[in-house]
């Protein structure tokens, strides 16, 4: 009796979209046929699947297809996967499915992500009737011949195209089909994380299955208008503090030495030594999750202790304006140097860390509570409570994210049991 070919849809960007049934199918199959074994191996490793992989793509589909068919006819089961999305749709898997149909081999679909359906759903174009055209021919003459019959097509048409060919393809579509509504859809399920300086960020040991956008490239000049300074989000916070000093403006001294960007400081309402960003912030210019640039006053940003509205609204901070007051440059510099000296004296700046590990609980200080519980120097793997300042978890060498989180959990439990205070992590943990 012949085996079964399973068409297993894979995520088109977000591993969380992989269904339990799809995972069960991969685990049960005798072997897996993949468009690119290197890409599929990442998926399998993420889910802990250990199965033999064979390559099946447009350049070997004739020979590989016959080999896979022979194994299916011998009774083995095969899970066919593509790099992303549903196999056999605008994909070489179509030929393998045809071979199976011609030879009486059962084919079963394991539904999941499909780029064309996702794109259609979010396009804003009519979805009742549509035509899927897939990839257009690369050859110019063949492409025009393919588009010619579509001039009178009234249904929504869906095309696939590589990013580097997109402009030329759009020009051809405009020429062939005329000026009509269109939608460009890409990375339909790819999660992204906006990263500033990363000073208080801890990434999981498995990394991040998405796009990390480093915003430190968003630099530029500080603009002054009266007592207001406006700075780009990617600028180091220290640079803004120095700009205030050179302008003879006071109010931002507390922030000198905070190892982050202007955007990161707004995002978490950074503060130290009795000051917070909300004390000086006037307004923020940001990109909304929908792609619109807006400006909001500080009063609309829900600024609280290590919190702002940007934690939940998906916006990307572009610039921030702070309102300061005229001051004596000598006194400003003295205050900045004093605070930086305190940091060097009290904080473990000589060892890797993600900054202050726990938020300050109401009515107490995290570091003092941890020291009170006798946890100075307490460690888990390569992570340890700093000998210099108990509010910091430092990397003594080879510490993993798991080490840090395990140590934090131990500290939280002990402090809660002995003092009644519940410590909340101030570091941001990013895992996916």
Image: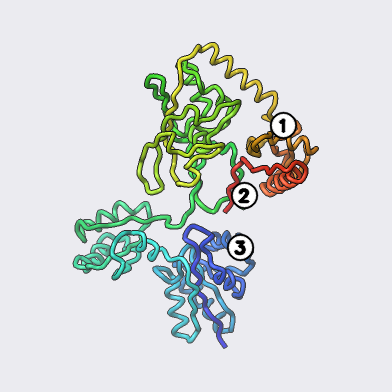
Name the image quarter holding the N terminus.
Answer: bottom right
Residue wearing tag 2? 204
| Residue 326 at x, y percent in the picture | 45, 15
Nearer to me, 184 or 224: 224
**Of the pair 335 and 53, the residue shown nearer to us:** 335
Quarter residue 179 falls in: bottom left
CA gap, disc 1 and disc 3: 39 Å
- Where residue 2 appears, as percent x and y from the top left, is 55, 85
Disc number lying in front (2 or 1): 1
Q: CA distance from mark 2 to mark 1?
A: 24 Å
Gap between marks 3 and 2 measured at Cα: 15 Å
Colour scheme in use: rainbow
Q: Give the residue number, with chain letter if any, for mark 1.
A: 389
Residue 397 falls left or right of residue 157: right
- Residue under the image location 19 percent in, 67 percent down: 152
Element class at badge 3: helix
Mark positioned earlier in the residue sequence (1 or 3): 3
Q: How many marks?
A: 3
| SS of the residue under disc 1 | loop
Residue 302 x %, y %: 48, 39
Q: Nearer the viewer, residue 172 or 273?
A: 273
How packed is label 3: few (under 14 Cα within 10 Å), some, or many (20 or more)? few
Mark seen at residue 263: none
| Residue at image location 45% in from the left, 77% down from the top | 97
Mark 3 — residue?
Answer: 47
């Amino acid at each position: 009796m012949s085996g079964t070919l399973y068409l297993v849809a894979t995520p088109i960007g977000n591993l969380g979209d992989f269904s339990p049934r799809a995972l069960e199918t991969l685990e049960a199959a005798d072997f897996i046929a993949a468009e690119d074994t290197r890409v599929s191996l990442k998926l399998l490793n993420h889910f802990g699947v250990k199965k033999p992989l064979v390559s099946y793509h447009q350049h070997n589909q004739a020979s590989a297809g016959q080999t896979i068919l022979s194994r299916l006819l011998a009774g083995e089961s095969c899970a066919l996967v593509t790099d992303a999305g549903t196999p056999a749709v605008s994909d070489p898997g179509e030929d393998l499915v045809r071979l199976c149909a011609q030879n009486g081999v059962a084919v079963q679909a394991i539904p999941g992500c499909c780029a064309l359906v996702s794109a259609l759903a979010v396009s804003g174009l009519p979805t009742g009737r549509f035509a899927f055209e897939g990839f257009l021919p690369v050859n110019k003459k063949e492409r025009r011949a393919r588009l010619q019959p579509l001039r009178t097509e009234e249904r929504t048409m869906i095309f696939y195209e590589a990013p580097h060919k997109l402009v030329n393809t759009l020009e051809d579509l405009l020429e062939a089909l005329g000026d009509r509504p269109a939608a460009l859809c890409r990375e339909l399920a790819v999660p992204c994380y906006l990263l500033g300086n990363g000073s208080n960020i801890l990434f999981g040991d498995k990394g991040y299955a998405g796009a990390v956008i480093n915003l430190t490239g968003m630099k530029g000049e500080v603009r002054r208008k009266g007592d207001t300074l406006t700075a780009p989000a990617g600028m180091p916070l220290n640079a803004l503090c120095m700009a205030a000093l050179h302008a003879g403006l006071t109010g931002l001294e507390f922030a000198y030495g905070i190892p982050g960007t202007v955007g990161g400081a707004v995002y978490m309402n950074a503060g130290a030594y009795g000051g917070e960003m909300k004390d000086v912030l006037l307004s923020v210019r940001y990109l909304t999750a929908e792609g619109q640039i807006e400006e909001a006053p500080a009063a609309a940003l829900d600024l609280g202790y290590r919190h702002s509205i940007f934690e939940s609204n998906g916006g990307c901070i572009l610039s921030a304006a702070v309102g300061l007051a005229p001051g004596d440059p000598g006194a400003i510099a003295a205050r900045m140097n004093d605070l930086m000296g305190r940091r060097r004296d009290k904080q473990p700046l000589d060892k890797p860390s993600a900054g202050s590990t726990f938020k300050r609980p109401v009515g107490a200080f995290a570091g003092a509570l941890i020291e009170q519980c006798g946890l100075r120097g307490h460690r888990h793997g390569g992570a340890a409570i700093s000998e210099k300042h108990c509010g910091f978890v430092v990397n003594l060498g080879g510490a993993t994210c798991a080490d840090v989180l395990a140590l934090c959990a131990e500290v939280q439990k002990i402090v809660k049991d002995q003092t009644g205070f519940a410590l909340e992590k101030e570091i941001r943990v990013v895992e996916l």
